Amino acid sequence: MLEMNDISRVYRTDLVETHALRGLSLSVEAGEFVAVTGPSGSGKTTFLNIAGLLETATSGSYMLDGKDVSKLSDNERSRIRNEKIGFIFQSFNLIPDLNIFDNVDVPLRYRGFNGNERRERIERALEQVGLASRMRHLPSQLSGGQQQRAAIARALAGDPAFLLADEPTGNLDSLMARQVMDLLEQINQNGTTIVMVTHDPELARRAHRNVQLLDGKIATSNPFTPQADVADIAEPAMQPVA
Amino acid sequence: MEIRPILSAMWRNRTGSVLVAVQIALTLAIVVNCMFMAKSRIEFIARPSGMDIENIITAQSLGFGSDYRHDETIDADLRALRALPGVIAVTPASGIPMSGSGSATGYKTSMDEDAPRETANYYRFDEHAEQALGVKIIEGRGFTELEVRRADDENYDRMPPQVIITKAYAERLFGDEPALGQLIYDGLNESAEVVGIIEHQYGAWVHWSSFDNVMWFPQRQEGPSIRYIIRAEPGQRDALIPVVEQTMQELNSSSRLVRNVRTMEETVATSYEGDFAIASTLIVAIILLFVITGLGIVGLASFTVRQRTKQIGTRRAIGARKRDIIRYFLTENWLMTTIGIVIGTVLTISLNYALATAFEIERLNYVYLVIGMGMLWLLGFVAVAEPARRASNVSPAVATRTV
Amino acid sequence: MFLYNLRLARLSLMKQPLLTGLMVLAIGVGVGACMTILTFVYSLTSDPIPEKSDQLFAVRLDSWGPDEPYDDRRPDEAPWQLTHADAMALLESPVPTRHAAMRKAVFTAVPENRDVAPFLTLSRMTGGAFFDMFNVPFLFGGTWDEDADRNAENVVVLSKETNDSLFGGENSVGREARFGDDVFRVVGVIDEWQPIVLYYDVNNGPNNDVEDVFMPYTIGDRREIDMSGNVNCWKDEQIDTYFDLMQSECVVTQFWAELENEAQVAEYQSWLDRYTEGQKALGRFERPTNNRLSTVTEYMKIREVAADEILVVMSIGVLFLAACMFNTIGIILARFIAKAPVIGLRRALGASKAAIFRQHLVEVGVVGLAGGILGLLLSMLGLAGVRAMLSDGDRAAHLNLELVLIAIVIAVSSAIIAGLYPTWRICQLAPAGYLKTQ
């Protein structure tokens, strides 16, 4: 599904040269739920931008869905973002002037679907996240959790090959965070690949696999862990704290 | 207030700053050139005419049909018009000065075939012309009643033996020599003596370069058209207009038309209307441009303030006083205005040069450049004052808020 | 997608109504100022008779005196008018399809109805060919025939207004009308006709009204009808009477010829040159041969119908629009840069640069359209102002459909030009830069 090979990214300004990624290699299988973690400055954001085709790597190759996407033009990358990738952001990034329906509609517009197809997809996606009744609301009229669910609906509406989530619960309280995570898990179980960037080990544990970044490289990559185990380990571990 | 950090902030947002500067520069170039051209026009319109234009009424009588008697009609008209209360003087006239229509021909100072000629705009008036026009004869005398030839005079087609000319024309004809008593000659070498010199009077065509080359003949204009120049006592003019018209109509309305009884002011305004229209257009352009540029600065500054709310809050949080914030914005705007004015100065001079080359426009008087600069500095200051005040009201608490 | 972009534009513009209003105002004022002046210049320079302006020629012969040119400023130009004698001679030429000499005169119209006061009429004294040459529309009747020209018959064509005054607007063809002491037979009444520029006689004032009556040029000599209009002389001659003037070297008459093709033009040109050669033998035409044929538009250009000062104001107007545009560019740029996060998001969600570009171009286009409409309203106001200031501005200072379209095109294209740079700038933004929480 997603295969990065020896990816490096260097930012240059007049004064300094920053190596955000140094030879990162990562492969994600279809249907996987991968968490990418790491402390601030470890290269999470750069990884996310490159994985989401928002930026290009300085060197290295990136295969997405069997296709080399590291050398594509801006236009082709826009199309792949539109068709294959669903973004979920920490701050939701809903467009405040548009209602929920229209927000979900945004990527579909660029896809060039006709009106009927768009409406069907929007309604289906909103139903899936439980917001069908709120589609005429403006983002500001919804709670944070609802906003993030709307953003997830927007990511899903185009049937992407994988979802790219950036701290999806970072702006939410714990109850809402749990709901959103439940939703993501459910989406994953329905077959959508998810790559989630987070600094929260707690969240990371709910993924199938945990990739830890440090100084622009993969420090550890935990192998596939059954979810039940994560929960088993997590629950007792939390109890002394609670 | 240190300018360096402001400059570096402007450098980072250089496109925006350049746009404001270019706008100021264009505004300066347009405003200064417009101001200068408008001023030239206004001065042109306001040139002293030498005549008492404000108190003069003019009228035309146009005879028709075989019953029309030209001299008799004029005699009767003059008698009646001169008897009207409030009338100072009336002269029959071949044309109205500054009306845009008249006659001109060249005269010389000797019989010599090749002597240079100087063109004069000539009028046929009677002995009341000086009083009727309100001009001043500074040397010699006006015409006498006996000198004035009627249209039925057998010598009407000959050049009359006396003429009165303006001082300007006298100087162009005779240079430094005294003109009074000299002879001038027409193309057929008929001559006339200069019996009087008018201090100053304009002729027919306001745009003619020799506008003040004017000559009077003691004659009545031939028929069937005759005009009257009627000078009213101050304050009587407007009331006299209908009276003049009615008086003339009552005297004869069967074999002549009475036309164009109106103030000379109106006639002169019509001659200058193109200049007036251009001056007004330029002034409107100046005002509009100031408003647009001012609003543009207000708009952009308010927008910048809104965008920088957090930054302003941070400054406040770390101890900037309200007036530091105000001063920051004023200084920033002053810098942009000044850069614009510097570019604008070059632009103003180039524009004036281009216009002067293409269209025979006067070269710029730099006083107007200085005035324009001052106005733009003031405009920039006024326009940014309110946004700066709003910026100073940003709460320091904004700094800690995440939006 | 266009409708979608239109909806986005509306949302975006409504969000900051003051800035939007400012942009619309800036473009509107710029376009309004420009259009006011452009309308004026356009009226003064546009072809008044496009269907045949290249077949109508103002004819001029350089009959001026040997010592100096007619116009010191432009020594190559021949005098604007012909002498009466030359005009009469040119009327004998067999070459042109049509031709007409013309001048002005003043008559007092005396209505049959004694209750209506006599009134002044301006007359164009010309040939019967005048009406067909200049495509003058007739309401009743038509022109007079060649015999009327040859025999200097008392025939007259009335303007609609004169016919209204004299005959209450009835079909007056065949009736008699009194002008001064003479009685004329009405042969035609023309419909309303008023070229913006009185191009057939710019010499006596391009802003004048079309004359009230038209009469055969030839009756001038029979009735000794005085000149009205410009007379220019160079020679020292004793001129007392009508015939003194008409036989002098003074130029008094305008002359037009209709020539259908280049061959005919060439033939006429050589006919004219032969004529002046013949006159040179008689001691006239002492200057180098300079016989000019100018088409309507050429002649309007030569006569500088659009004065320098109008062109100065025009260039100021264009700069004015430029200043307004820079104003607008600044505001658009600031707004677009503030929208960077949303644009970054749209890019992340798959919008191509082109899609973003189109979206924002639609937005500035909407601003341009609104500015154009405001500009039109303002230019109507401006033109009303011009009309109030100029007594003859009434004709020139009017918008027509073509000018309205030009205004809209200017407004929208200047808004789009103003928007191009900001739009290009935001398209260059890296999509990733604005997605993280601030």
Image (tube, grey):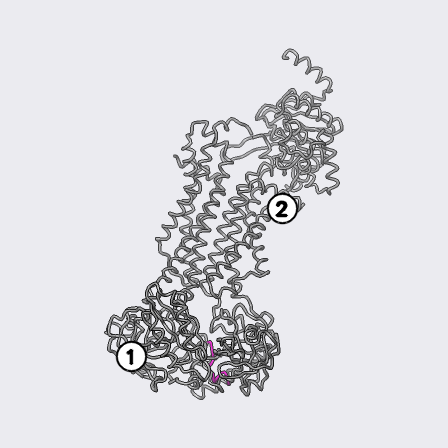
Residue A145's quadrant in the figure? top right
Q: Position of residue A215 (x, y in %)?
A: 58, 25
Question: Which sits in the foreground, C368 or A47?
Answer: C368
Span highlighted in magenta in the image: C80-88
Q: Are marks 2 and 1 on the same chain?
A: no
Q: Secondary structure at mark 1?
A: loop
Instruction: Find the residue positioned furthest to the top.
Output: A240
**What's the amino acid at mark 1?**
Glu
Report the side of A230 relative to C216 (left or right): right
Q: Is residue A242 above or below residue C284?
A: above
> Which chain contains the residue that carries disc 1?
B
- Percent across and percent down for residue C106 are 47, 78
| x and y percentages locating residue A197 in the rendered image | 64, 27
Note whether residue C83 is visible.
no
**Mark 2, residue position:** C358
Residue C22 sits inside the magenta stretch = no
Residue C2: percent from the left, percent from the top?
Answer: 66, 47
Q: Residues within 10 Å of mark 1 (few under 14, many from 20)?
A: few
Q: Which mark is residue B145?
A: 1
